[in-house]
Amino acid sequence: MYTLLMTILLVLSVLIIIAVMMQPAKTDSAMSSLSGGAGDLFAKQKPRGFEAFMQKVTAVLLALFFLIAIAMVYVSAH
């Protein structure tokens, strides 16, 4: 059981890395960090399309990662 959970955890790790790397970059200029980002106050919008999908996929993969990690602790303790 432990080896199955370890295999699933490793696969999830690779999938999380791929999902994070596929997300679009949110580049901010150095001037934005100095000015406090006041120019971007009204530029914030909800992610749509591919970006929203990748955020959801990443969140689900991370939730599964933590659940499997907790299950591994439980299995190894008993």
Image: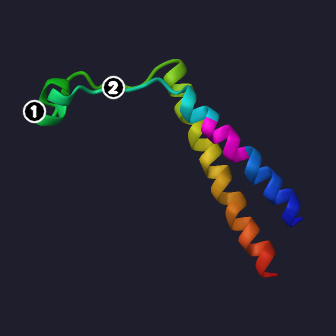
Give the residue furthest to the left: 35
Q: Start and end of the magenta stretch?
A: 12-17
| Way the structure is coloured | rainbow
How far across and how far down the image is residue 32, in percent?
A: 17, 29
On the image, which quarter does residue 37 sit in? top left
Q: Which residue is mark 2?
A: 27
Q: Amino acid at mark 1?
A: Ser
Tell me the tag on residue 23.
Answer: none
Q: Residue at x 63, y 33 (%)?
A: 18
Q: Nearer the viewer, residue 5 or 48?
A: 5
The percent position of residue 12, horizontal first and vertical second, equals 71, 45
Q: Residue at x 20, y 23 (%)?
A: 42
**Residue at the spot 82% in from the left edge and 81% down from the top edge:** 78
Q: Residues within 10 Å of mark 1 (few under 14, many from 20)?
A: few
> Which residue: 79% across, 75% down?
76
Q: Mark 2–mark 1 contact, CB under 8 Å?
A: no
Work out whether 49 lies above or below 14. Answer: above
Mark drawn on residue 35? 1
Q: Quadrant of the N terminus?
A: bottom right
How packed mark 2 is, by other alpha carbons closer than 10 Å (few <14, some 14-19, many 20 or more), is few
* Circle nearer the N terminus (2, 1): 2
Relative image position of residue 53 (x, y in whole percent): 57, 26
**Residue closest to the eye, 73 or 21:** 21
Secondary structure of the residue carrying tag 2 is loop
What secondary structure prevails in the magenta region?
helix
Residue 58 lies in the magenta-colored region? no
Q: Nearer the viewer, residue 10 or 50?
A: 10
